[in-house]
């Protein structure tokens, strides 16, 4: 059972965050440090006088994530291998809350283990399955190409008895495949989600990181990005647009076995081409759902091959009724 929302959720919401996002009031650093003492040494006084951390320090960000996951979601033993992507939890939670609204189709938000989600590229952090299960009780399959990432995810599951029943891990052996090799021949999923690699090459990813750090005045320190990331987490052939196009192509082969396909899209410039590809693939409904965290704007693209009537009777169909 997920913990009750902490005092974080009782504060005024940040502009843009989903109303159910328990991090909408910002970070209660004293409360978090009390729950996870390792965060304490990283907490310092901000220029405005309140407590904060150095969000450009990878160790501080990881300690914050550990504290958030423990205090707000009851997740113990969360850790990452060196260099792995360290996700901003409020933004990751927002994606899941909007997905819950998508599945609700204007009705009650669906909860419980009967709701099955597939996380493409779940990564070493396992962040979406952890948050999605704790918030809504959903069941997850997390897939990844990286064996080390899956080993890290497995250690997190082992540290939290009971989670292995709700979250399964699968290795994708083909770097050019998305759903193939992962989805079984008779499997159904209520939704798929993904945070695709953004860059088209390792060089492009490195140059983007360096530019970011120069802008922050950190010079050559840019090689140690605050949110990390390496290999397939950051880049793939064709970049974000190429990855999502492959996802669209494969999704057409699963048109009756997935209720909603979704993926984050970092660059709004990619949307027109992806929407054209979806229309060509025969998607019957395409949605772009905006999200925001403070000044940061983001979005996800959602599509389905099922008419609204079929989506509304989906639970009975999925149960074989």
Image (cartoon, grey):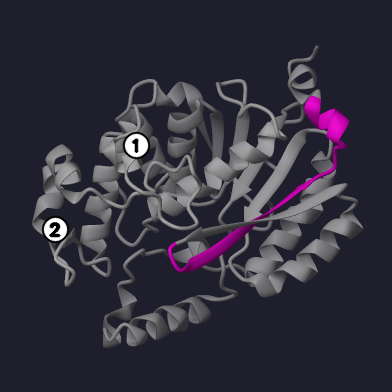
In this view, 286 is above or below 319: below
Residue at left offset 61%, top offset 42%: 99
Taking the image as shown, residue 180 lies to the left or right of residue 89, namely right
In the rendering, at what x and y percent does residue 62 appear? 27, 54
Residue at left offset 85%, top offset 37%: 306
Q: Which residues are magenta?
A: 294-312
Name of the residue lying farthest toward the top:
321
For numbered disc 2, what is the local secondary structure? loop
Taking the image as shown, residue 136 lies to the left or right of residue 286, namely left
Other residues around mark 2 within 10 Å, as few (<14) / some (14–19) / many (≥20): some
Nearer to me, 137 or 175: 137
Taking the image as shown, residue 315 lies to the left or right of residue 215, namely right
Is 298 covered by the magenta stretch?
yes
Mark 1 or 2, nearer chain start: 2
| Residue with the mark numbered 2 | 43
Name of the residue lying farthest toward the left:
41
> Which quarter of the figure is the C terminus placed in?
top right
Q: Residue 293 lies in what quarter of the image?
A: bottom left
In this view, 209 is above or below 79: below
Q: Nearer the viewer, mark 1 or mark 2?
A: 2
Is 127 covered by the magenta stretch?
no
In the rendering, at what x and y percent does residue 20 appear? 47, 39
Which mark is on residue 156?
Answer: 1
Residue at left offset 20%, top offset 44%: 32
Q: Residue 107 lies in what quarter of the image?
A: top right
Residue 182 shows in the view: no
For numbered disc 1, what is the local secondary structure? helix
Name of the residue lying farthest toward the front:
12
């Amino acid at each position: 059972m997920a913990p009750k929302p902490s005092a974080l959720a009782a504060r005024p919401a940040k502009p843009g965050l989903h109303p159910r996002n328990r991090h909408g009031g910002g970070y209660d650093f004293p409360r978090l440090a009390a729950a996870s003492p390792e965060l304490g040494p990283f907490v310092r006084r901000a220029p405005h006088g309140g407590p904060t951390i150095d969000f450009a320090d990878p160790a501080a960000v990881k300690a914050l994530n550990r504290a958030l996951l423990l205090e707000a979601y009851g997740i113990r033993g969360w850790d990452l291998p060196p260099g792995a992507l360290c996700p901003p939890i409020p933004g990751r939670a927002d994606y899941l809350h909007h997905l819950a609204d998508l599945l609700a189709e204007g009705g009650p938000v669906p909860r419980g283990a009967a709701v099955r989600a597939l996380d493409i590229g779940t990564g070493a952090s396992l962040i979406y399955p952890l948050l999605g299960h704790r918030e809504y009780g959903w069941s997850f399959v997390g897939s990844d190409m990286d064996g080390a990432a899956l080993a890290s995810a497995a250690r997190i599951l082992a540290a939290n008895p009971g989670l292995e029943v709700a979250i399964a891990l699968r290795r994708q052996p083909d770097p050019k495949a998305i759903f193939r090799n992962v989805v079984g021949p008779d499997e159904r999923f209520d939704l798929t989600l993904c945070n695709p690699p953004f860059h088209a090459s390792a060089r492009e990813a490195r140059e983007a990181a360096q530019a970011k750090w120069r802008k922050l005045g950190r010079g050559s320190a840019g090689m140690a990005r605050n949110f990390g990331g390496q290999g397939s987490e950051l880049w793939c052939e064709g970049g974000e647009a190429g990855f999502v196009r492959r996802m669209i192509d494969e999704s057409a082969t699963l048109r009756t076995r997935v209720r909603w396909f979704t993926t984050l899209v970092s660059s709004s410039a990619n949307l027109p081409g992806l929407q054209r590809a979806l229309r060509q693939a025969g998607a019957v409904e395409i949605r772009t759902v905006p999200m925001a965290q403070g000044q940061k704007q983001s979005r996800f693209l959602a599509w389905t091959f099922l008419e609204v009537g079929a989506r509304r009777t989906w639970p009975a169909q999925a149960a074989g009724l």
